[in-house]
Amino acid sequence: MAQTEEQPRRLNRAQVPCPACGLPQDRVLTLDQDWVLLEPDMTPPAHVVPADHRWIELSDGRATVYGVCPPDPSQRCRIPHHLACSARPLPDLWPWLTTLRAENARRTERQPTTQPPEPPGEWPTTG
Ligand SMILES: [Zn+2]
């Protein structure tokens, strides 16, 4: 019985090298009959991973995005290898924060240049 349960799991996954960095990544079948390349041996808490990048494995070995929001604090997940790949740029994980930073950059440019305050002409005497 255990062998028949294990067979689909093996068919739904393989380990392949990343073409960018050469490290192994787990190629796992998704519910959409597509493949996702996951970081091996890494299951961070789901709440510390951006929502679109939280993957969980089902009992048949296939993977799906963990869509529970807010995530269960005890839920672990897997992450795509491209987030951890040292040979690729990190994607924009927090678009709202990137937008805020860009807006703050524009606000900074619009601000009049301010001079640092002038030091007093004569320092007060102390003690
Ligand atoms: Zn890589």
Image (cartoon, grey):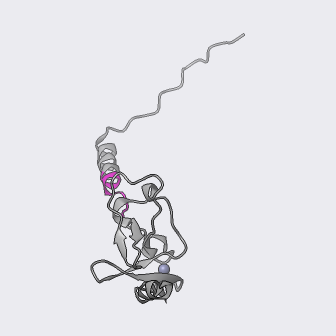
Of all residues, the one furthest to the top in this rendering is: 127
Q: Is residue 98 above or below residue 15?
A: above
In the image, residue 91 lies in the stretch drawn in magenta: no
| Overall secondary structure of the magenta section | helix
User: Of residues 19 and 61, which is closer to you in this image?
Assistant: 61
Relative to 24, 8 lies left or right: left
Hey, which residue is sitting farthest right in the picture?
127
What percent of the width, then of the height, locates residue 105?
34, 49
Q: Residue sitting at 49 percent across and 81 percent down? A: 25
Q: Left or right? Give the position of 77 relative to 107.
A: right
In the image, residue 45 sits, relative to residue 33, either above or below, namely above
Figure check: 26 above or below 48: below
Q: Where does the image place residue 9, in percent across and percent down from the top left?
A: 44, 84
In-image side of 44 versus 126 (left or right): left
How many marks are shown on the rendered structure? Answer: 0
Residue at (29, 48) in percent of width and height: 103
Magenta stretch: give its range.
Answer: 92-99
Q: Residue at x 30, y 43 (%)?
A: 107
Name the one closer to the observer, 57 or 89.
57
Q: Quadrant of the C terminus?
A: top right
Residue 78 position within the rendered picture, expressed as x and y whole percent measured from the top left: 45, 69
Out of 97 and 107, give the one closest to the viewer: 97
Residue 76 location (% of width, % of height): 47, 62
